[in-house]
Amino acid sequence: MPTKKSNFTEDFREEAVRLALTSDQPHHDTALNLGVGKSTLSKWIRQYRHQIQPDKPRRDKDEELKRLRKENKILRAQRDLLKKAAAFFGPKMFYGKVDEVCSH
């Protein structure tokens, strides 16, 4: 006996694929929760993968890389400043006791 073929909207399909790709659960669990077959969801993922997520991960990684490079530049500048201060004030300023520094 043939089964009834369900018609799902494009929005439903896209959201199902987005959910399957972003959730931590296996695709077969996502399919079960949505009431679609695992093979159907897999087919939708193949069809929509190139449309839904092509630039987002790349853009996120580029933004993260830019942020980390900026942070790295700031940290290097702070490190260099501390090195210069250590050379200028001497090791006692940074490694000596607080009483020795305050008593002078």
Image (cartoon, helix red, strand yellow):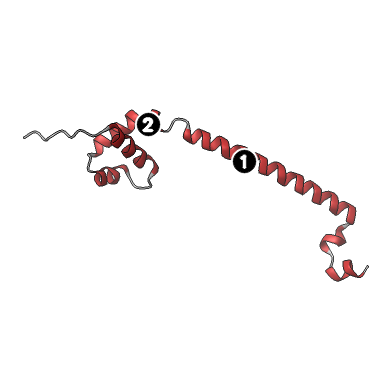
Q: Is residue 58 left or right of residue 93?
A: left
Q: Horizontal placement of 6 versus 70: left or right?
A: left
Residue shown at 86% from the left, 61% from the top: 93
> What is the x, y in percent for residue 104?
93, 67
- The front one of 87 and 70 is 70
Tell me: 72 left or right of 63.
right
Horizontal side of 19 relative to 38 (left or right) equals right
- Structural crowding at the residue carrying mark 2, measured as other residues with C-alpha within 10 Å and reported as few (<14), some (14–19) or many (≥20): some
Q: Position of residue 70 (x, y in %)?
A: 67, 40
**Tag count:** 2
Q: Secondary structure at mark 1?
A: helix
Say which label, 2 or 1, has the lower sequence index.
2
Q: Which mark is residue 49?
A: 2
- Mark carried by residue 67: 1
Write the residue at 62% across / 41% down: 67
Q: Residue at x 82, y 60 (%)?
A: 94
**Residue 5: x %, y % from top left:** 15, 33
Q: Which mark is residue 47?
A: none
Mark 1 closeness class: few <14, some 14–19, many ≥20 residues within 10 Å: few
Tag 2's secondary structure?
helix
Q: Quadrant of the N terminus?
A: top left
Distance CA(mark 2)–CA(mark 1): 27 Å
Residue that sits furthest to the right in the current view: 104
